[in-house]
Each structure stands twice: as structure tokens, then as C-alpha cells.
């Protein structure tokens, strides 16, 4: 037997080898999108689970305190996401924050400020280090990808009052001028103080409050549109150009969108809304709004995600859902408004 001839017969030619490699390459190219889609589906499901955990924590807070957590108390004081920490198995972190913050959360030690809470991070957007440019370095900290529902902000486009006078009426009923009392917040994560002055106006004593002394006026029974038809929280839009950046550029009136979960420097950090002119961001590339509110020329008001085509939300009954980013803006506003009597069905 000619072994040399047999060896040549069972070997691969260069052409055959190239054909096999090409076939493998085509198969990989065909399978890669499916693999990526499967991975994204898993990340999206985890994001929904995060919102589920956080919404149940809000409901436990309500069950314990008798009212929903306030969006913010004051610029340097606890926000809703610090208030619910004990209900997502973060009692120790809440205790550290309460113990070290003093009169301002910005006095927190840097190590504490950068402790991440897994259920506050969307896996598609992923963990990142927050830098503070050009705001104070004390603003930097562990981020959150979720925001409270401040209500139907679309109505702010056509009130008699100019936007500059609306002030914090989008989510904060303290310090608002009496002329815009009709623009009180209509969402579910808002700050409605129970304290009133002798004239019957909401008082401005928020600086002396903390999570134990603030009594929020919003209770579940006041969500008259129904808890299963009213949004509680959702993914907040963070333009890709802002990812990892927080703070305010006061010289140019710019507010950056990516903020620490404990940061209360303004309502825009912890809340988002919907309505005419304030639809869900279509993509992470969508820039921040140029609309002026309280003198700020650039900030983010809207919900948005890094999931293709959808944005995840939690309802006030604890259920969760992924809404299409092209949902009708009026329908979104109705879902954000707890008491307008106009029920929107999005699922």
C-alpha cells in the first residue's frame, strides 16, 4: 500500500479549508444577532425585576408610614430612593447615610457616596463611575437608572404662567408661588408637605425636615385613577453624552442627567414625567431638553431607556410593564396623572 498516496487522499486542500472557515464565519454572523437579542432580553427582564423590587419597597414604605415617600425634601436632604433602602435589604446603608449625613447629604464620606445598590442599576446601561463635571465633587456618587413619576408635565407647555415661574410645582409643592397652585404635581413620587402657615399656604420649613419629620400628604387612596393604571417609577432618560456625568454648569444653565441615587439637588435628578411634548425618549442619543424651567436652559424631564424600542415602568400596584417608546404622548400623560379621570390602557 502506498501510504503517501493515502495521506494525500484524506487531507484538506487549501481551498476546502477556506470554504469551511467561510461557512463557519457565515454561521457565526447569523447566530450573533440572536445571541445578542437573547442577552438583551435577559437584561431587560432583570431591569423589570429591579423596578418590581423598588415598587414593592415603595408600597412597604407606604404601609409603614401611611403615605408615599416624598420625591425630595430639600436640595441637600434625603430623596425617595434613600427612604426605601430599608425595604430592599439595605438597612445598614440607610443607617450609615442617616448617621453621617448631618445637615447635608453632601457631607457623606466619599466611600459611602459610591456604594452601589444593584436594584438601582439597569444591566443594559450597566455600572459606571459617576464623575461630577463641572459641579462640586461631592455630587459624585453611585448612580440610579430609575426615576419617580412626577406627573403629567405636558400641561406645563400651555399654562398661563411662564415656565420660569412654575418653579418646583412639577414635583414639589413647597416654595411654589400661589399663582401656580393649580399646577400642583399630579404624579405618585412627589413632595406634598402637610405643613401650612397661618394664611393656609404650604410652609417653607423643608430645611428643618428629615425622613422622620417630613410628613408627605400623598396617600395611596388619593390615586383615584387606580393604582394599576397609574405609573409609579420608570427608567430615566440619560442622554449618552451625559452618561457618567452629574452636576450643574450654572454659567451655561446646564443640568447633567446622570445622578447619584441619594442626590436631592433639584427635582430633575430623581423624577421624570410625561405628556404632550414630553414623550419617552426615542433613543439614548436623544439630547436633553432645551426647555427652560426655573432658569435652567438644559435638563432632562422625560423617561427613557437603553433597551431597543421599549422603556420599563412600574405601576403603583407593584406590577411592571415595558412600554413602547413611541407611545402616544397624551396616553403617557394620562398614565402619569393619578387623578385626571382619563384612564389610559397601555397593556
Image: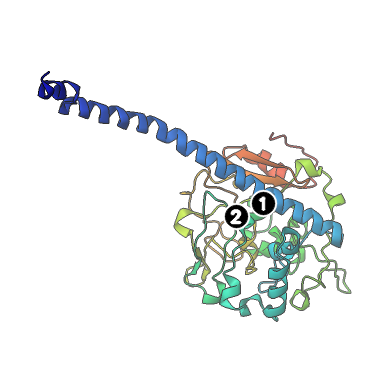
**Callout 2 environment at 10 Å: few (<14), some (14 to 19), or many (20+)?**
many
Q: Mark 1 points at which residue?
A: 153
Q: Quadrant of the N terminus?
A: top left
x 51%, y 55%: residue = 288
Q: Earlier in the sequence, mark 1 or mark 2?
A: 1
Q: Nearer the viewer, residue 23 or 133?
A: 23
Residue occupying the point 85% across, 66% down: 194
Pick the front one: 231 or 171: 231
Of the numbered discs in the image, which one, if any, rests on residue 301? 2
Q: In the rendered image, is residue 275 in sight?
A: no
Q: Are marks 1 and 2 in contact (CB under 8 Å)?
A: yes
Q: x and y percent of residue 186 in the render?
A: 75, 52
Residue 72 placement (x, y as % from top left): 71, 66
Position of residue 303 measured from the top left corner of the image (x, y, whole percent): 60, 49
129 left or right of 113?
A: left
Residue at image point 82% right, 42% down? 226
**Is 318 on the left-hand or right-hand side of 42?**
right
**Occupied quadrant, residue 85:** bottom right
Q: Which of marks 1 and 2 is in front?
A: 2
Q: Nearer the viewer, residue 147 or 16?
A: 16
Label 1 secondary element: helix
Crowding at dot 1, Cα within 10 Å, few <14 / some 14-19 / many 20+, comes out as many
Amino acid at each position: 500500500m502506498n501510504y503517501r498516496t493515502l495521506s494525500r487522499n484524506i487531507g484538506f486542500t487549501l481551498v476546502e479549508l477556506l470554504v469551511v472557515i467561510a461557512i463557519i464565519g457565515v454561521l457565526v454572523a447569523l447566530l450573533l444577532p440572536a445571541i445578542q437579542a437573547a442577552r438583551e432580553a435577559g437584561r431587560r427582564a432583570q431591569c423589570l425585576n429591579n423596578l418590581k423590587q423598588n415598587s414593592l419597597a415603595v408600597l412597604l414604605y407606604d404601609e409603614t408610614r401611611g403615605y408615599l415617600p416624598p420625591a425630595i425634601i430639600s436640595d441637600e436632604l434625603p430623596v425617595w430612593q434613600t427612604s426605601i433602602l430599608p425595604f430592599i435589604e439595605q438597612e445598614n446603608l440607610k443607617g450609615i447615610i442617616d448617621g453621617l449625613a448631618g445637615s447635608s447629604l453632601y457631607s457623606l464620606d466619599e466611600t459611602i457616596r459610591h456604594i452601589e445598590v444593584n436594584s438601582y442599576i439597569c444591566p443594559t446601561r450597566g455600572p459606571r463611575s459617576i464623575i461630577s463635571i463641572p459641579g462640586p465633587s461631592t455630587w459624585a456618587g453611585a448612580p440610579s437608572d430609575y426615576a419617580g413619576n412626577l406627573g403629567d408635565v405636558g400641561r406645563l407647555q400651555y399654562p398661563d404662567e411662564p415656565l420660569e415661574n412654575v418653579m418646583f410645582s412639577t414635583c414639589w409643592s413647597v416654595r411654589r408661588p400661589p399663582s401656580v397652585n393649580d399646577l400642583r404635581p399630579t404624579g405618585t413620587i412627589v413632595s406634598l408637605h402637610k405643613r401650612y402657615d397661618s394664611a393656609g399656604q404650604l410652609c417653607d420649613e423643608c430645611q428643618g425636615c428629615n425622613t422622620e419629620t417630613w410628613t408627605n400628604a400623598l396617600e395611596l387612596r388619593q390615586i383615584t385613577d387606580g393604582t394599576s393604571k397609574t405609573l409609579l417609577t420608570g427608567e430615566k432618560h440619560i442622554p449618552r453624552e451625559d452618561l457618567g456625568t452629574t452636576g450643574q454648569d450654572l454659567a451655561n444653565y446646564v443640568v447633567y442627567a446622570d445622578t447619584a441615587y441619594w442626590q436631592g439637588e433639584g427635582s430633575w435628578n430623581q423624577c421624570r414625567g410625561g405628556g404632550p411634548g414630553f414623550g419617552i425618549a426615542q433613543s439614548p442619543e436623544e439630547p436633553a431638553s432645551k426647555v427652560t424651567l426655573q432658569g435652567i436652559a438644559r435638563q432632562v424631564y422625560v423617561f427613557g431607556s437603553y433597551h431597543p424600542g421599549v422603556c420599563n415602568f412600574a405601576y403603583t400596584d407593584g406590577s411592571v410593564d415595558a412600554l413602547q417608546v413611541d407611545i402616544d404622548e397624551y396616553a403617557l400623560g394620562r398614565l402619569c396623572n393619578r387623578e385626571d379621570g382619563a384612564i389610559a390602557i397601555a397593556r
